[in-house]
Image (cartoon, rainbow, N blue to C red):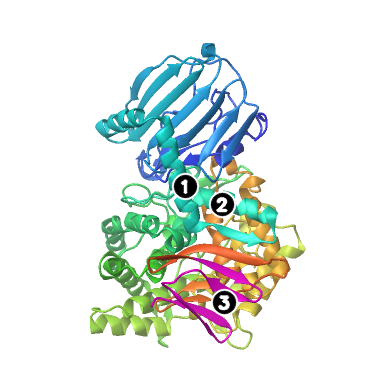
């Protein structure tokens, strides 16, 4: 980033965030300015109660108190090494150690008059900040650590000081080199796209730790938007990338859900249901922290009902667990916590449904991913995901015969809105009777159609915020009618406003599956520019981590056609003519390998895995 633009500074700070999976630090200049919003966040560290619960903002370590009012000439984020450089009157490099998460290091070169004195400092709070400073003429070094336990923070800072700058930097570089080997994606033939993909991968890798539990909010560790609350964004959009490249981090994300099963069970009981009901927004306790109202840019205050009605998150959590299991084959998780997640979510759906006199099964009063319409009955996404959840749980060993039979019967009778005459799924009961507005004919997209048409009118139209029916074709393609993707794309894509940052990447994936490369690449590029061009006007509050996860899925699931199953890894590519090749670092059933898709075929570089062609696709299997 060249110079200092006070109007865009907060956006730049998000883009330049340094993180180590546990601790995130916004890329603010060394010296403060009213235009800046420095922030340091520790994963899972929240303050407040109820909807006011928010990710705690911790004391900054990369600010130089007492320095003159000077501004940087340039800041550069080295994505390969996770280092932020600043050039100007103060020249510096800083990093948050990927080798020692929670430990931070900085070296500054400047006129000694501009540098603070040396010494040690401990800042108490919800997280203790321990800093140790050294001044060696024009060189200033700072070693720091953050931890909820003051003794751990102080010991980590002392250890970092003893290890020294050079060794810490070497360890950090080596750790990042390993992660890039695991997850690198190469698009041969599109250098502009390649650069944005690297930024995406960097923040995905930096935002999720691999130890204990990982509470991954919608903006990761890059900002405080949405108060750092955890949504389905993390389970469905972020976790698959990690399951396929760095399973320990995916397992830590699932551990966050596992440890909140008691709260989810309690919520199901409170509602008179069985099993476990996970909340729409959660934080530390596992209780629902969804706000009850919100103010639109127009000034209108609306009631927020997603916490009450957007229940598809129950199946989304189960889907994330299944995604992890299919990629890793983790037997311990499958027999223990993973099985518990799958069974308890299935029990919830079995208690949530309603059976009519004809024997058909319904799920009433819900909100689907398309939040422009709420509440609705028999939302296709919710019903089909619940059906998938019930069937997956019913297939588990050890499930009681009576429960297994009940779940399968409910799944078979659940209505899904599919019309076999047209091949189109009705998004919810009555959707086809709404005003047939095609938003693509009215406005350039992405567009906030609820603001364009008004919140009351939008509910009476067929305009969608984001993919709903189409999400089924992306997440559970084996649960929808064979061959139904093209006709549903034709119907729903022009009606989608892409009012959510989650939308463009998923459409790119599905358009690629349909062989519609030009619109697929168009929406892929929109997804890459969400934060770089601040398309939503909200990047100052942090990066859209789920959009980044969706971008990886568009490349892996959409263009490369990679899909993990319980039996094998399927590769069924759709490569645009302008691309020479598409290459991934992946890990399947514990074996790291590189997958390369070219117009002439598919290659892998592993001796431990087997690649064979079956019909028009390839399968990767363990020996």
Q: Indicate which disc residue 572 carries.
A: 3
Which residue is disc 2 drawn over? 200
Above or below for 449 versus 588: above
Q: Quadrant of residue 88?
A: top right
Decide whether residue 602 is among the magenta residues: yes
Q: Which residues are magenta?
A: 594-623
Residue depth check, mark 2 versus mark 1: number of the one nearer the observer = 1
Mark 1 residue crowding within 10 angstroms, few (<14) / some (14–19) / many (20+): many
The answer to whether residue 147 is seen in the rendering is yes
Residue at image position (56%, 84%) is 482
Residue on which disc 1 sits: 176
Any part of residue 427 in sight: no
Percent across and percent down for residue 7 are 66, 32
Q: Position of residue 620 (x, y in %)?
A: 47, 76
Image position of 266 (left or right of 511): left
Q: Neighbour class for label 2 at 10 Å: few (<14), some, many (≥20)?
A: many
Q: Quadrant of the N terminus?
A: top right
């Amino acid at each position: 980033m060249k110079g200092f633009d006070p109007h865009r500074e907060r956006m730049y700070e998000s883009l330049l965030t340094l993180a180590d999976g546990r601790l995130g630090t916004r890329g603010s200049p060394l010296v403060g300015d009213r235009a800046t919003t420095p922030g340091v966040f520790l994963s899972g560290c929240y303050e407040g109660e109820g909807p006011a619960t928010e990710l705690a903002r911790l004391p900054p370590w990369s600010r130089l108190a007492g320095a003159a009012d000077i501004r940087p000439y340039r800041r550069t984020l080295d994505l390969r090494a996770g280092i932020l450089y600043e050039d100007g009157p103060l020249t510096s490099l800083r990093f948050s150690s990927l080798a020692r998460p929670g430990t931070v290091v900085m070296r500054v070169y400047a006129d000694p008059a501009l540098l603070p004195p040396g010494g040690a400092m401990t800042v108490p709070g919800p997280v203790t900040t321990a800093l140790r400073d050294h001044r060696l003429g024009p060189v200033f070094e700072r070693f720091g650590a953050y931890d909820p336990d003051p003794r751990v923070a102080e010991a980590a800072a002392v250890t970092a000081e003893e290890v020294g700058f050079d060794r810490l930097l070497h360890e950090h570089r080596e750790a990042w080199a390993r992660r890039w080997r695991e997850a690198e994606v190469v698009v041969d033939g599109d250098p502009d796209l390649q650069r944005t993909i690297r930024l995406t991968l960097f923040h995905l890798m930096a935002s999720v730790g691999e130890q204990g539990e990982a509470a991954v909010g919608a903006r990761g560790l890059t900002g405080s938007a949405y108060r750092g609350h955890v949504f389905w964004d993390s389970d469905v959009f972020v976790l698959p990338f990690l399951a396929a490249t760095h399973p320990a981090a995916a397992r830590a994300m699932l551990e966050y859900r596992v440890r909140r099963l008691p709260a989810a069970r309690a919520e199901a009981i409170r509602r008179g249901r069985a099993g476990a009901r996970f909340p729409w927004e959660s934080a530390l306790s596992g209780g629902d922290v969804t706000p009850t109202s919100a103010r639109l840019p127009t000034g209108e205050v609306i009631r927020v009902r997603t916490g009450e009605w957007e229940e598809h998150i129950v199946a989304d959590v189960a889907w994330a667990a299944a995604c992890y299991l299919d990629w890793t084959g983790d037997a311990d998780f499958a027999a223990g916590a993973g099985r518990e997640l799958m069974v308890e979510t299935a029990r919830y759906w079995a208690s949530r449904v309603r059976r009519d006199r004809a024997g058909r099964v319904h799920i009433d009063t819900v909100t689907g991913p398309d939040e422009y319409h709420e509440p609705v009955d028999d939302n296709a996404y919710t019903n089909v995901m619940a059906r998938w959840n019930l069937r997956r749980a019913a297939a588990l060993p050890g499930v009681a015969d009576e429960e297994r039979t009940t779940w399968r019967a409910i799944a078979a009778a659940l209505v899904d809105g599919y019309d076999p005459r047209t091949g189109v799924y009705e998004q919810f009961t009555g959707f086809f009777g709404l005003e047939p507005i095609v938003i693509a004919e009215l406005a350039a997209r992405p567009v906030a159609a609820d603001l364009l048409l008004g919140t009351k009118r939008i509910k009476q139209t067929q305009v969608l915020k984001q993919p709903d029916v189409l999400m089924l074709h992306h997440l559970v393609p084996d649960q929808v009618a064979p061959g139904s993707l093209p006709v549903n794309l034709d119907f729903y894509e022009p009606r989608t406003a892409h009012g959510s940052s989650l939308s463009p990447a998923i459409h790119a994936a599905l358009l690629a599956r349909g062989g519609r490369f030009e619109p697929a690449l168009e929406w892929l590029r929109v997804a890459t520019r969400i934060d770089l061009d601040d398309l939503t006007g909200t990047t100052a509050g942090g990066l859209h981590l789920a959009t980044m996860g969706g971008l990886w899925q568009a490349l892996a699931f959409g263009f490369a056609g990679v899909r993990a199953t319980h039996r094998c890894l399927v590769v069924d590519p759709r490569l645009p003519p302008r691309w020479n090749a598409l290459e991934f670092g992946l890990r399947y059933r514990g074996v790291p390998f590189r997958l390369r898709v070219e117009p002439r075929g598919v290659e892998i570089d592993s001796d431990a895995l087997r690649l064979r062609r079956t019909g028009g696709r390839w399968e990767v299997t363990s020996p």
